[in-house]
Image (tube, grey):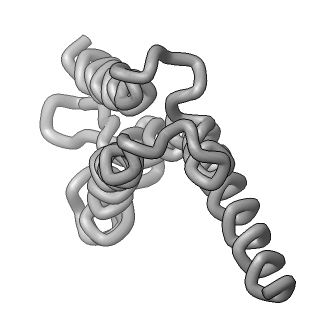
Amino acid sequence: QPESNYREEIFRGVTSSAVVVMFLFHPYILRYNFSMFACRDDDGTHSYLLRDTSIECWESEHKSWTLGLALPGLILWGVGIPFAAIYSVYRSRHVLQSPSTRARFGFLYKDFKPHFYFWEVMILLRKFLLISLSVLLFQID
């Protein structure tokens, strides 16, 4: 019995730490992934990556990085993480005040009223939208 409690305590601690780290790094990872799409026209016929102007956009190297890393990263971090968080909290919505649930996911809902347990995910999705708009609008400018 004591060993299973110890394992459960470690699992709660690891889960809680992972949730906090993912949410803290979320905007930075999104910004980096979106920056792979930020290109600027130089002469009207070629566009170059803003992060590294030696890379021509949508040529082999850029396309490989963008489609192989940035796009999957945007899907995973921009959509997957928020939906995994809301699913986890939604699944536990009836026991949000239990010590086990609060230890694992309390970071996501402790600052909100109980019926707004999902609001932290809304904030994440808003950040995703704002970061994507800032990159897209910068390109239009």
- Residue in the image at 36% along x and 20% along y: 116
Whether residue 114 appears in this view of the structure is: yes
**Residue sitting farthest toward the left:** 45
| Depicted 42 relative to depicted 47: above or below | above
- Residue in the image at 30% along x and 63% along y: 72
- Asked whether, in this view, residue 28 is left or right of residue 84, the answer is right
In the rendered image, residue 8, in percent from the top left (x then y), is placed at 70, 74
Name the image quarter holding residue 70.
bottom left
**Residue sitting farthest toward the front:** 1
| Depicted 133 relative to depicted 92: above or below | above
**Residue sitting farthest toward the top:** 141
Which residue occupies the foreground of this view, 21 or 12? 12
| Depicted 103 relative to depicted 120: above or below | below
Which residue occupies the foreground of this view, 33 or 15? 15
Task: Work out which quarter of the rendered image holds the C terminus and state it.
Answer: top left
- Residue in the image at 15% along x and 30% along y: 44
Task: Work out which quarter of the rendered image holds the N terminus and state it.
Answer: bottom right
How many numbered marks are there?
0
Which residue occupies the foreground of this view, 67 or 96? 96
In the rendered image, residue 95, in percent from the top left (x then y), is placed at 46, 45
- Residue in the image at 44% along x and 27% along y: 120
- Asked whether, in this view, residue 58 is left or right of residue 102, the answer is left
Whether residue 135 appears in this view of the structure is: no
- Asked whether, in this view, residue 100 is left or right of residue 94, the answer is right
In the rendered image, residue 62, in percent from the top left (x then y), is placed at 33, 61
In the rendered image, residue 45, in percent from the top left (x then y), is placed at 14, 39
